Image: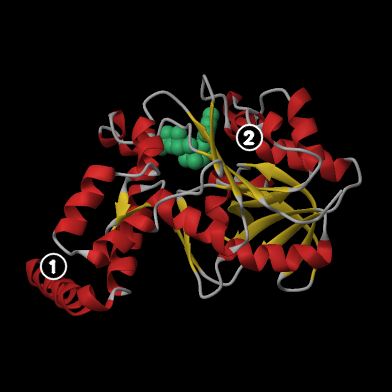
Amino acid sequence: MTNKVTKAIFPVAGLGTRFLPATKSVPKEIMTLVDRPLIQYAIDEARAAGIKEFIFVTSRGKSALEDYFDRAPALEEELRDKGKTDLLEVLEHTYMDSGAIAYIRQHRPLGLGHAVWCARRLLGDEPFAVMLPDDVIAADTPCLQQMIEAYQETGGNMVAAMEVAPEKTSSYGILDVGDDDGQVVRARGMVEKPDPDSAPSNLAVIGRYILRPSVMQNLEHLRSGKNGEIQLTDAIAADSANGEQTHGFRFRGQRYDCGSKSGFLQATVAFGLARPELRDDLRQFISDMGQIERAAQ
Ligand code: UTP
């Protein structure tokens, strides 16, 4: 088996209920941070890490996501006529090579593990990445690239990991921590969304994974787990139980949970402040808001 990672699965078939009513007609992954949809941040991160094939697991109502990567000839012509080459470049960046992108349907939202399993026929005997676009990670070296570099040394399975407040363990997959060298952690196992009193640690799995083909095979036989869903965490834990190594990787960067309203708003502010053309106005606005809030107290 090669240890080169060139394929990534993007499971985007969830219902996005935390953003209703918006997600009634707009896929969560198309919602924008400043001016780019969440999915573009994930694609850019995957490209930087050397991913060549992009597999989307979609569902009913996600056609805006599929259209997003298409060429837009009428718009291009209009921009060309008006000499707007900067905007043409922006568009160019959203296009994917022919054949580089595939869409698979998950017919029912049976869980993240099930969504990943839906892509099984597009993978061979090779490791693959899984990226959840609602975890947006701002980093000097993109998170998946950091992981792939570390993975060349470790092999096995690798998950992005981050310490969370102990009372938050029930929102995450949590690692049972073995040897820990600071950046790379040997995981003895992992548990999906444990209560704080039964959690093996507070080291949580974030939405970036590099997985062995055997995890896909484990998904084949998996029954539903926590919340009645087929859990990716359980398939990785089964690999560890079979003696395969799984590592947690403490990435360098700031993660925003854009699947939650609060995380999405925080990311909007942070990515806005990171834009030179927006920074001054936004900073002034935040400061004014702070003063108004304090005066009202
Ligand atoms: P979430 O747990 O955030 O669920 O899924 P969700 O449906 O997107 O959002 P809420 O909780 O209802 O607001 C994490 C990731 O797994 C995908 C989602 O699209 C998201 O990228 N997923 C989840 C699937 O593709 N299929 C599923 O059956 C479940």
Q: Position of residue 74 (x, y in %)?
A: 22, 43
Q: Which mark is residue 188?
A: none
The C terminus lies in quadrant: bottom left
Res 165 visible: no
Badge 2, how many Cα within 10 Å: few under 14, some, many 20+? many
Q: Label for residue 116?
A: 2
Q: Residue 20: name its quadrant.
A: top left
Residue lying at 21% horizontally and 73% vertically, measured from the top left: 278
Query: Which secondary structure, mark 2?
Result: helix
Q: On the image, numbered disc 1 is attached to which residue? A: 293
Say which residue appears at 81% left-offset and 40% top-offset: 125
Where is residue 137 drawn, in percent x and y? 49, 62
Q: What's the amino acid at mark 1?
A: Glu
Identified at 36% across, 42% down, the residue is 68
* Color scheme of the displayed model: secondary structure
Question: Tag 1 or tag 2, which sits nearer the N-term?
Answer: 2
